[in-house]
Image (cartoon, grey):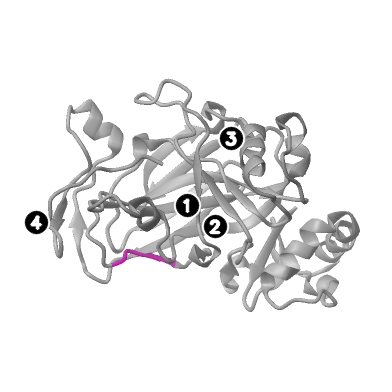
Amino acid sequence: MKLAFFDDYRLGVLTDDGIVDVSAVVKDVPAAHPQDVMNAVIEHWSTYRGSIAEAASAGSAVPVDSVRLRAPLPRPTNIDCMAVNYIEEFLPEKAPADGFLKSSSTVIGPGDSFVMQDLPGTVWEAEAELAVVIGKHGQNIPAAEAMDYVFGYTNLIDGSVRGLPGTRGVFYLMKAQATSCPIGPTITTADEIDDPQNLAIRLWNSGELMQDFNTSTMAHSIAECIEFVSSLHPIGPGDIIATGTNHDGLHPLNGGDELTLEVEGLGPLTIRVEDPLGRTWVRQTHGERRRAGLDGMSSQATGKYADAPAHAVPSS
């Protein structure tokens, strides 16, 4: 099943015919925020599943383009992101598990805009990722039991600004910008994904395929990611673990770009990129520059900070 929020955060199920409003099923859920509704559905899925499926089957679908899809998890308690979690040409060895947190206030949904802030970064980038949606409470979860804690999956773009000056707080600035965590369009329940460790991940920029890799090349499996994160803090229903990206196709963003991420089986997530400062960058991927023997990132071509020196670029 594909669960979604639409319009004024009404709960819906996305079907082949469109989206069906099933919000009547959860009308009695105490909710100060839409996240409370989705958390309740996830935590008590065994109770809600039949009623939601029945409502989706009996209801009338409306075209998706006639509604506004929202982030299916608009305010997760935790957004844990794995860092350097793919075996790549320039990262052939499995690195120790590592990660970082993104604030829930960075979340945006389908059709929203990732806004490039007024920061002297070398480049802004969008990292295509499979995100795991946690289904129940746990801590210190062994990898052998970790998949029992998975409710489902969604697309996630980790928006990053690289090459900021200085050292103190740079990684925080790099990852914590408002609007830098697009997710959606739905939560696809785990039963619909046969093998989450064999899914194609593709990201297009304005129709051009830029990232194309597979979850089979993760350095640390989904189960190992859950084990790692839950060893640090408790996790619970509606939390997100983003499983990392392959850096080869990462490239500078420009205002006006349209990004579409599609993890196999999850449907497309499309967002816009806005730069109020109107800066521009030459479009070169990490892989293209590395294979051409060029160091660092593509430099800024025009606009504010174009003449600023490049700085070290941490990986993530």
Q: CA distance from mark 4 to mark 2?
A: 34 Å
The first of marks 4 and 1 along the sequence is 1
Q: Is residue 251 above or below residue 277?
A: above
The residue tagged 2 is 183
Alpha-carbon neighbours of circle 2 within 10 Å: few (<14), some, or many (≥20)? many
Of the numbered discs 4 and 3, the one sitting upstream in the chain is 3
Callout 3, which amino acid?
Answer: Leu
Between marks 3 and 2 in the image, the one whose residue lies nearer the viewer? 2
Instruction: Say what secondary structure mark 2 lies in.
Output: strand
Q: Earlier in the sequence, mark 3 or mark 2?
A: 2
Q: CA distance from mark 2 to mark 1?
A: 7 Å
The residue to which callout 1 is attached is 157
In the rendered structure, which amino acid carries the disc numbered 4?
Asp
Q: Mark 3 or mark 1: which comes first in sequence?
A: 1
Stretch in magenta: 113-117
- Numbered circle sitting on residue 199: 3
SS for tag 3? Answer: loop
- Residue 178, image x and y in percent? 43, 66
Residue 62 visible to an observer of this rendering: no
Name the residue furthest left: 307
Say which of marks 4 and 1 sits in front. Answer: 4
Residue 190: image location, x then y, percent? 73, 44
* Label disc, if present, on residue 307 of the rendered structure: 4
Q: Say which quadrant the C terminus sits in.
A: top left
* Label 4 vs label 2, nearer the camera: 4
For marks 4 and 1, give the CA distance: 29 Å
